[in-house]
């Protein structure tokens, strides 16, 4: 696993048995995100993505974390093997993080009544980033905390359709397949296949991503893998 130092802003590899405590970032991807390759360039700090990375590291340092995992720069996406491993490990990485910062750039702290209108709640990948971590802190466009997954659970539940007990820590594996599928039914992804890949962790499924196969084929492969491990017939409600 590759983590970013919140102090030196350098990447370091860790074996599974030596991973330190770390924070994670959940966010809506934009242009000018800092990639694995662009970390080596001196100009990344002035970009919008660079400012977001610096703010995340600053917040993590304040909370006592020396390491952070950020999907934009901690994965070398030019390596298909590494990307496949990351996609299959992402749910676990979020679940093992000490804290997850959910950065909602389109929300002001004084305007939590419009929380449901944030793009963050409409994206496919942020579903597992909400459910998997034990602790989620919500940050507004000024990086100020305005709530946690626990304190906002009664509001988040009707917005997302996710039951309170799941938001408060119960494993999603205790719910039906159809129920888990419903949580993602109105969410969107930039790459069409990701609408299937982003659900793998919720069903404890592992399969290689094949970009270019299309959303229907990707979703069919997901269903087949679910059927191999689960006899829950509610899956066919989403065929």
Image (cartoon, rainbow, N blue to C red):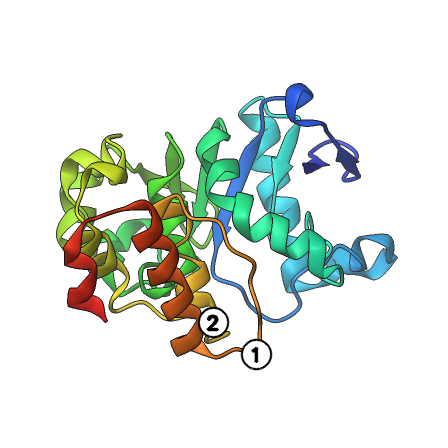
Q: Which quadrant holds the C terminus? A: bottom left
Residue 116 visible: yes
Image quadrant in which you'd find residue 121: bottom left
The residue that label 1 is drawn on is 212
Callouts 2 and 1 close, C-beta under 8 Å: yes
Give the CA distance from mark 2 to mark 1. Answer: 8 Å
| Residue visible at 56% across and 58% down in the picture | 208
Out of 112 and 49, give the one closest to the viewer: 49
Determine whether, in the image, residue 182 is placed left or right of residue 51: left
Mark 2, residue position: 193
Residue at 38% x, 39% y is 132
Instruction: Categorize mark 2 by other alpha carbons within 10 Å: few (<14), some (14-19), many (20+).
Output: many
Q: Give me the residue at 15% from left, 38% from top.
A: 164
Pick the front one: 29 or 231: 231
- Closer to the chain start, of discs 2 and 1, is 2
For the N terminus, the image quarter is top right
Residue found 34% across the figure and 51% down from its top: 228
The disc placed on residue 67 is none
Picture coordinates of residue 18 (x, y %)?
68, 20
Name the spot of residue 101 as percent of width and height, x first: 46, 41
The location of residue 15, given as percent across then percent down, is 71, 27
**SS under mark 2:** loop
């Amino acid at each position: 696993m590759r983590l970013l130092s919140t102090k030196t802003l350098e990447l370091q590899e860790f074996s599974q048995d030596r991973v330190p405590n770390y924070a994670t970032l959940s966010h809506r991807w934009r242009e000018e995100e800092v990639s694995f390759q662009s970390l080596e360039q001196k100009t990344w700090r002035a970009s919008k993505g660079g400012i977001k990375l610096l703010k995340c590291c600053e917040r993590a340092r304040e909370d006592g974390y020396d390491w952070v995992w950020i999907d934009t720069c901690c994965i070398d996406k030019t390596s298909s093997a590494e990307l496949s491993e990351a996609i299959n490990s992402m749910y676990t990485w979020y679940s093992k993080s000490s804290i997850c910062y959910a950065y909602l750039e389109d929300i002001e702290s004084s305007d939590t009544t419009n929380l449901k209108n944030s793009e963050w709640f409409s994206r496919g990948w942020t579903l597992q980033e909400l459910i998997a971590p034990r602790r989620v802190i919500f940050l507004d466009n000024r990086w100020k905390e305005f709530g946690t997954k626990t304190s906002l659970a009664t509001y988040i539940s009707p917005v997302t359709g996710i039951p309170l007990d799941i938001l408060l820590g119960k494993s999603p594996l205790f719910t039906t397949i159809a129920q888990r599928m419903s949580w993602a039914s109105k969410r969107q992804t930039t790459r069409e296949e990701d609408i299937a890949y982003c659900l793998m962790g919720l069903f404890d499924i592992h399969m290689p991503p094949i970009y270019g196969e299309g959303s229907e084929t990707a979703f069919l492969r997901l269903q087949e893998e679910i059927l191999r491990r689960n006899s829950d017939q509610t899956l066919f409600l989403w065929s």
